[in-house]
Amino acid sequence: MTVRETIDFSSKMLGTNNEFGMLGEGLIKKHGHINKVDQDLDLFMKTITFGEGSNLITNYIIKILGLSDCADTLVGDELIRGISGGQKKRATIGEMLVGLARCFFMDDISTGLDSSTTYEILKFVQQMTHMMDLTVVISLLQPPPETLELFDDIILLCEGQIVYHGPRENAINFFGTMGFKCPDRKNVADFLQEVTSKMDQKQYWTDEENKYQYWPIEKFADSFHSSYLPRLVEDNLYMPNNMGKHNEIKTNATRSISRWNIFKACFSREVLLLKRNSPLHIFKSVQIVILAFVISTVFLRTNMNHKNVLDANKYMGSLFIAIVIVNINGMTEIAMTIKRLPTFYKQREFLALPGWALVCSIFLINIPMSLVETCLWTSLTYYVIGYAPSFVRFIQQFLVLFVTHQMSMGLYRFLAAIGRTQVMANMLSTTALIAMYIFGGFVISKDNLQPWLQWGCWTSPFTYAQNAIALNEFLDERWDTEFYYANANTIGEAILKIRGLLTNWHWYWICVIILFGFSMVFNILTIFALEFMQSPHKHQVNASAMKSKKDCKNHRIGTGNASTSQVVLPFQPLSIIFDHVNYFVDMPKEMIKYGVPEEKLQLLQDVSGVFRPGVLTALMGITGAGKTTLLDVLAGRKTGGYIEGTIMIEGYPKKQETFSRISGYCEQNDIHSPNLTVHESLQFSAWLRLPSNVKSRERDIFIDEVMDLVELTGLKNAMVGMAGATGLSAEQRKRLTIAVELVASPSIIFMDEPTTGLDARAAAIVMRTIRKTVDTGRTVVCTIHQPSIGIFESFDELLLMKRGGQIIYSGSLGPLSSNMIKYFEAIPSVPRIKEGQNPASWVLDISSHTTEYEIGVDYAEIYRSSYLYRDNMLLIAELGHPAPNTEDLYFPPGYWHNFTAQYMACLWKQRCAYWKNIEHNGVRFLNTFIVSILLGVVFWKIGSTITQQQDVFNILGVVFGSALFLGFNNCISLQPIVIMERVVLYREKAAGMYSTLAYAIAQMAIELPYIIVQVLVFAMIVYPMIGFQMTTVKLFWFLLYMMLSFMYYTLYGMMTVALTPNLEMASGLSFLIYVFWNVFSGFIIGRELITIWWRWVYWANPAAWTVYGLMFSQLGDRTELIHVPGQPDQTVQEFLEGYLGLEGRYFNLVTYLHLVVIALFALLFFIFVKHLKFERRRSYRRRSWWRIQRSHSPRRSTRKHSKIVALKQRAANAALLKKQKAGGDEGGGRGGGRAGGQPCPVLEVSAGDALTSRTLLVVPPWGRMDMNKSLPCGSAA
């Protein structure tokens, strides 16, 4: 969903979508009645009247949070490029602010935001708090002084104890009474965090009469509790309330809107998501069409007869495969549900979305899709195959398949809801599928089951689907040919009796009703699971991290010469020069649709500069300025777009294959393998990124030094875990990201927001680490959003960009940022910095689009005319030529290490990760054990005695189940693991760590020992229980074919992930091929009975080879006579050759074919991983602003100044201005003007900016204003 759609949905669910109700409440609140209307209410009323089709509050919150430029952009995820991390944080805030809540808890809301945007958001929150009497508690990381001043009270927590709780302005004095003083240029928030730290406390001690001694947390807490401050809190707590006098606000309701409105909002969202997911549904429909074509031509009516039971068996096979296909088609619900669960759990926690609304909406929205897919299948197969030629029976078959499809979607939705993770849901779904197969009546008939197991058939939905669809076909008059067998009089009755199915017609409707009942039950169970089961991704703290917390507390980072002497690995200091760099992407279709004529969208405009060794450079700019885009372009990380300009290293043209050897890139998203420890992550990075001549002992020492630098020593054995779920916290992951790059000992390091998500102390640790890195002579560039004064002034130079990708300052900061301040204050009309103000916050404020527009300057033009620009161009010219007696960087082609070393490193990493992945491997072996027991019990000793045709079919069923079920489970259970590691692969490949071949072979090889153990467990249980002959040769063939089967299924699962962009598509493709393998395996229809033009598929089907090999190795030498209905008795061997086409001459061939297909899947996996990349690092955000001219402003009459406004509303704004100019003296009303014919100015707010229109904006305490509407100036603008 887009940002606007996300916030608007939250607004609807939280009950703020009724502006007219708010208007009435506001009138009553202000006047006690609804007769009198003042100017504010008149303005609000007119605004909501003009707001047809839009939500006033949603639009206003989007404006205030600075999300207008991305309001119509998809939120995105790890692979889909959407909004930035900071914008996601603001969208999360917006979801809460649009509600009716009176109490807000906001955790680290400034993460990823620049200080200017943070200030504007919190300024709005402050005003809303004071006007609407809200209670707001906010935790912030590194708040700048002006942001801290917005707060009324401060709670200072340390190690779980409150050391201060009281007015903000008294905090400094409180610590001053203890002897601690905040320095003049020290951020108060940083002081408050560091004064309780043993590491930093001493520098603030100012009591000369007493010698400094460490103040422990307990001493601070005791001082607080003995002061007057706790009594103030207690007085507020025990103050009596007046709730008894306000009965009208008392309520027991848990929702702010009716159930009907909840359902309407949820259903509308599902309709929207259905449209957004149209490629998936189209893929499913195409899949149905393809399979329908295949099945209808395999069972073509010209080859189908009605003469005997064998003919009826063919029809039975086609009916069964129809049930299987519609069932498997519903399995895509698993991935879709799992993907949505985190969002649902979040919305459930703040009572925005109940489970019943979600499930009912999904159920209803899927009905038409189910009708379409079922209709496609039935229409394409019914008459082509030649089922009973009656339209009524056509409709009845359609009905059976429809309710079966509904049942399957409900089942897999329920399993996903209780599994809650992809691995667990896959295990549950495959186990359920196997159980339904076995007890469905086709793999083994009900009559052949042990009597005490036959009840299982009545628990399987397949039983009812099989009975209903078989009754519909075989009770037709064309199956009335006389045939006396098992108390049956016709062929139709005989096949039903043989298969253990029901024979009375009334069971058709009973089965249909039961299937519909299954669907209802599964959906109801899904509602209960969603309502009552907890999210599996609640953040879990590392036990090792907690254990080592006290050990880390007293740990100090080395200083002095430690910063240089410890880094012993050699490197070459290098400069990076970029001259007139431009970056374009293809113009998005959305922009073309709104009339933008250009073919390309420019994101970087004429960017030039130099990053030098030993110089720490800050890359800053407001949100959307192009900071990350510039880093990606310089680092060669862009996967799309067009780059112009020159990039050089030490005067030589940059070569990406060389650059990756001497550079590091700390991405904003901390991407790591979750199942490794901190030390293992660093060890793997250092192993492959340091030269091969570095000895392992030196490498280990260097890793320890890097961990010491970033304070990760105490977390050495902590699991990395999943971001936001388990393992390391956000700031620990950030430090690990930096450490992973530092262990490579690069000459140039790019860091994208290294302090984002860290508190002041952690940020200081990171900056000290970065500073020490720079002091070694490395080139370090950091993008940074909201640095404190201390962090900002630790940088040497600043490259400042404005929105649109243009440089507005590039030069040294100077002492106390004096050079930068002098430069900007020299520009006329630029507001001067206030005393004590953070220079970083100040420069972001004055460089915002609003300020630039207000003072009438173009900072980019001023910079290009300045001495800074000339000096930089001279420096570029100087460093752009190689120094004398130097040579271009050269490394041997390839990687630091040979292929064998790469493979061993990748295999070591996979071994460590797999061994710790208890969920995946535990579930794999548990599923193997359960399926083995199930198959063994159901098919108990069927291999020991064979007397009739059905006995062979039963053995074929268990062989079929053994070959396909567990193998397919391996396929789909592995896919989430490979998807997860693929994201890490993209980062590691970009860093030049290893070749794709080494990764691919290691990924495949690590599965082999687990598959061997899995096969041994399966064989030891199933083989003796089935009753196969216990000979060494036969047991060997059984083990061999099972292992080969598991292997090619596993490799096929990997291959589909490498071929597709996401898990849903990979699962869909897996199901498609699985159905092919199922149909042509020799179980549904024997090889000799397959039509000639499809028989080649049998020989191309690895599942058929497995069934062939297992059946022939176990039964190929059996000579017992068996009874075949309607035919003379035959030996087992003759029946295998005549009906199933299992001949001894092909036995060796199918064995070799297994090896060939395994090699083929392995090769395809490698090719797809190497050449297909689904990560999109093209930093395009839908620009939802355009330029309109403010000609009405007197001070703008001689100059052309522009403002970016919503692209989506470009046509509306143009029409509005035209109407205002044409009819400006018409007075009030929609689009009316003020007296004298002057058009009313359009209120505008851009990302991170304050309101800048000349009109006064009044926000009543009971409502908010829609900023997109033109308001009558004669009222109360």
Image (spheres, grey):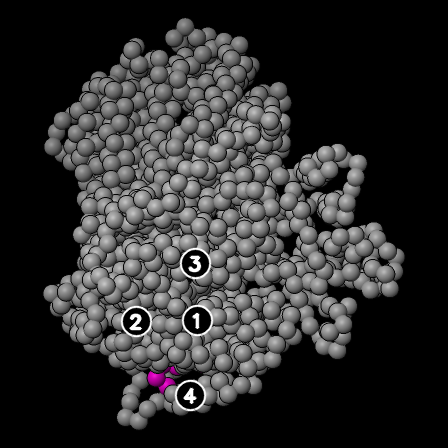
Disc 1: CA contacts within 10 A as few (<14), some (14-19) or many (>=20): many
Q: Label 3 is placed on what type of residue?
A: Pro
- The local secondary structure at tag 4 comes to helix
Mark-to-mark CA distance, 1 and 4: 18 Å
In this rendering, the answer to whether 604 lies above or below 921 is below
In this orientation, which residue lies closer to the viewer: 480 or 644? 644
- Camera-near label (4 vs 3) is 3
Q: Residue at position x 40%, y 90% from top?
A: 878
**Residue topped by disc 4:** 875
Q: Which residue is mark 3?
A: 143
Distance of mark 2 from mark 1, alpha carbons?
Answer: 15 Å
Q: From which residue to which does the magenta span run?
A: 646-651
Mark carried by residue 771: 2
- Residue at position x 83%, y 59% in the image: 1234
4 or 2: tag closer to the N-terminus: 2
Check disc 2 and give the amino acid type: Arg
| Dot placed on the residue nearer the N-terminal end, 1 or 3 | 3
Relative image position of residue 1056 (x, y in whole percent): 38, 48
Which residue bears the numbered disc 1? Answer: 619
